[in-house]
Amino acid sequence: MVNEVQQPQQQPAGGREMVNIKEMGTPSIPIAAESDIHCLTIIGQIEGHMVLPPHNKTTKYEHVIPQLVAIEESKDIHGLLLILNTVGGDVEAGLAIAEMISTMSKPTVSLVLGGGHSIGVPLAVSADCSFIAASATMTIHPIRMTGMVVGIPQTFEYLSRMQDRVIDFIVRHSSVSRDKLNELLIGTGGLSSDVGSVLIGEEAVKHGIIDYVGGVKEALAMLRLMVNQNRGQDLN
């Protein structure tokens, strides 16, 4: 007996518009098939090995990492624009994503909009060039742990070594000095009930963490310039 192959049902145009309104907030989505620049967003809280509650807005690292591999392998993509509006999240997951971005062969530009807090700082500096909006903020603070913690010296040594990993990455991929970064980490004047510092737009640039103050226009112009320069090197 020959099984009849069922043809996939075509979704009506009205149905597609309803999905677009629900998912994207617009009835039609512009298609940028001709663009050779890929835009990757890191928003909400970076989810690592533990699944966060469903009401949290999250970026899952198991979704981002395959995208980065695909971008690196794609012959049609020549540049990556990384948009950040994150409160931070899992340190190891954030560092894994940051390390992948920093080792890509294609030009990368990051743009902090709204906020790039905590582990969002290494993500922001992982790109070849970084921008921050004038109204955006970055919170720099020591690593914290939630839940039950074993109160032994090894726990504090582990936290210290993990903090060193974050500091080393930021210093290697930005212009901030280690002394200045440590000063910002233990500052007591920027947060009302915690240790750390909040930097707004120009302050992040002044301390050497971010390269430029700017928005989408400036970030895309820089990325386009880097892509063209990269193409010129490939031709030589």
Image (spheres, rainbow, N blue to C red):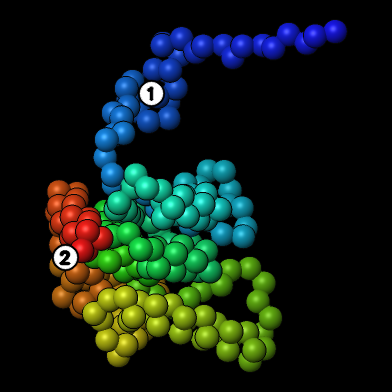
Indicate whether 218 appears above or below 101. above
Return the x and y of residue 228 as percentages of the image width and height: 18, 55
Residue kind at label 2, given as amino acid type: Tyr
Q: Which residue is mark 1?
A: 21
Indicate whether 28 appears above or below 55. above
Q: Quadrant of residue 139?
A: bottom left
Q: Give the residue furthest to the right.
A: 1
Q: Would residue 62 be seen by someone viewing this image from the given angle?
A: yes
Return the x and y of residue 132 as percentages of the image width and height: 22, 60
Number of marks in the rendered image: 2
- Residue 157 horizontal side relative to residue 135, left or right: right
Q: Quadrant of residue 22?
A: top left
Q: Which quarter of the rendering shows the N terminus?
A: top right
Indicate whether 5 appears above or below 162. above
- Residue 15 horizontal side relative to residue 114, left or right: right
Q: Which residue is mark 2?
A: 212
Mark 2 element type: strand
Return the x and y of residue 218 as percentages of the image width and height: 14, 54
